[in-house]
Structures are given as structure tokens and as C-alpha cells.
Amino acid sequence: MSRIDLLLATYNGAKYLPEQLASLATQTHGDWRLLVRDDGSSDDTLDVVRAWSETVSQPVEIVEDGRKGLGASLNFAALLEKSDAPYFAFCDQDDAWLPEKLEVMLRAIRSEESRIGEDASVLAFSDLLVVDDTLTQVAPSFWEISRIDPAAGDTELCRLMARNCVTGCASLGNAALRETGLPIPAGARMHDWWLAMVASAFGSLVPVHQPTIRYRQHGGNVVGAADSRSMALVGQAVSRPRFYFAKALAARDNSQRQARAFAERFGDQLPDEERALVEGYGALADQGFLARKAFMLRHRVGAGSPLFRLALLAIS
């Protein structure tokens, strides 16, 4: 069996942790180690973890480095830096994994490694069941409501740099991806988005067309499952136009900041076309109105619903 490091980033997660931890214990792939890093919880999150660790045979390690308040992305990044297994999986504190999650994801990633080589950066990512606070299903496919379609080119760098299609808690990466992607810079929007771009540029993104987790929505999600279907987007924009316009501008700015960080790190390793792509997107704000629109259209930047792509073009 191939060992997987499960990277559990916590912050005031005691309410939902027992169900997530229980789902780890039922995984059909049992060769794993759990690495936990808490970001300064004021509840008994770590007490829950320590008590549970006594009930499983797999190793559980708590990473204590004295830092607090890093936020979700850098908390996961700190865990990734401690990982040394052949594979790693990000683990959110408030979800629940389906029993076959690790087995299914490992099969997908090893199949791709056998095709392109273990030295290539590979990230497998799956669909998710969307559930409410009580784990009752509210949507059978996160990809469907989010308009994620790997077959339509969502994993291409030109689309991925403007809109992430990978949900970190439903992904599995290999050691080559970890080595290439680290350190995750402050300019990265999210750890999973950064690694998705790395895999797209230097290896492979592998879609797994089945849900592997119950993705809990409870109002406190860092990202969450927003409905990105066209009519839903129209309704949201009409009901709160200022809020959604400001949100769209922030998303645009964050994605361009991440593109600049990516170009700074990897520009000299990218083919000329991809280097021009990420550098151009990162510097888009410096261009004139018509030049910005032309760049977006020429490079097919963006993914998701037609309305989302149109909105992205409009604010670029």
C-alpha cells in the first residue's frame, strides 16, 4: 500500500470534527498518517483530536510551531511542508469523507503516474456531495451547481488561472507536486488553487467523476458551494448588486495577484506561450481597455457558465 499524509487544518472545529474523524477511520485505504495543525482555536479542538487518536491504529501527529492566525491557506501550506509521504490529501475539519475516498483517488493518481511518470506533478480531484449542517444532502454534484466541467477545458491553465476548479478537500497530490509547489507564496489565493496551477503547468490534473466527500455547508465555510448556474448568478446579482460587483472585483484582483506570483516563481520554466499567458494576465490592470478585452478573448481566459465568463470579460 502507498502511504498518504492526511493534512488536517483546524480552527475552532470541535463541533464538526468528530464526524470528520470518524470518516477517516472508515477509509478502505488504511495506510495513512494524520498531520494536524491548529491555527489558535479557543475551543477544545485539539482535545477532540487527541482523544480520537487513541482509538485508531494509524499515527496522528500534531504540528506545533507557535504560530497562530495564519488563515486556512497558509495553515494548509504549513502542514504540506511537514509532509513527506508519497501522497498527500487536504482534510477540512467540517466535512465527512466517503469510505472509498482515498482508495478511489489513489487509483486515479497512480494510473496517471504510470502514464506520464512519477516525477511529474499530479493532482487528482473529485466531485463532491453538497450537504447541509446535519450532513443531509442538498445537491448530488458540486461540479454541476458550480459549472465545473473538466471535459470543457476547465483544467487548462488559461481557464484555471482565473477560476479554480479544484476543491482541496476532494483532492490527492503526489510528492512531485509537493516538491514543485512549495513554498506556497503569500500571493497565492488558496493552497489548492496554487497547486492546481502547478499541476496543470508541470504535470497533470486528473478529474475523478464521482463524489468522494460530503461537503458540509454551514455558513462559516472559507469558500463554500456557491451556485454558479446562470439563473442563480442573475438572481444574486439583482438582489445585491453592489456586494456581488465588489466580490467580483476582489476575485479578479486576487486571481491576477496569484498569476503574478506564479510567473515570478515559474516564468523561466514555462514554455513561451504559457509564460506570456500568466505574465499577461497578472499585468492586465496595466493595459488599456481594448487591450484587456482582446487578451481575455484571445486566450479564452475564464471558465464556468457563459454568464460568468461574460462578467469576467466585462470587469477585466
Image (cartoon, rainbow, N blue to C red):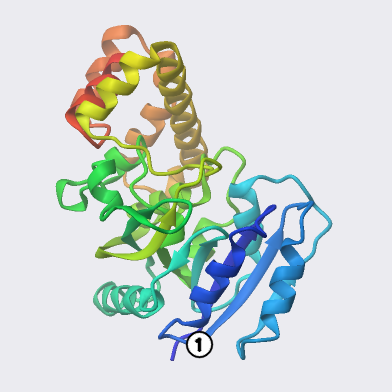
Q: Position of residue 34 (x, y in %)?
A: 61, 75
Relative to 63, is 79 on the left or the right? left
Q: Residue at x 28, y 21 (%)?
A: 235
Q: Position of residue 155 (x, y in %)?
A: 27, 50
Element at label 1: loop
Looking at the rendered structure, the kind of residue marked 1 is Asp
Q: Which residue is mark 1?
A: 31
Q: Residue at x 80, y 61 (%)?
A: 65
Question: Is residue 242 at least partly visible in the picture?
Answer: yes
Q: Residue at x 50, y 87 (%)?
A: 31
Q: Residue at x 42, y 25 (%)?
A: 252
* Towards the viewer: 247 or 217: 217
Q: Is residue 45 above or below residue 146?
A: below
Q: Position of residue 186 (x, y in %)?
A: 62, 40
Q: Is residue 303 above or below residue 6?
A: above
Q: Is residue 53 above or below residue 163?
A: below
Question: Is residue 316 at least partly visible in the picture?
Answer: no
* Towards the viewer: 260 or 15: 15
Q: Is residue 305 above or below residue 67?
A: above
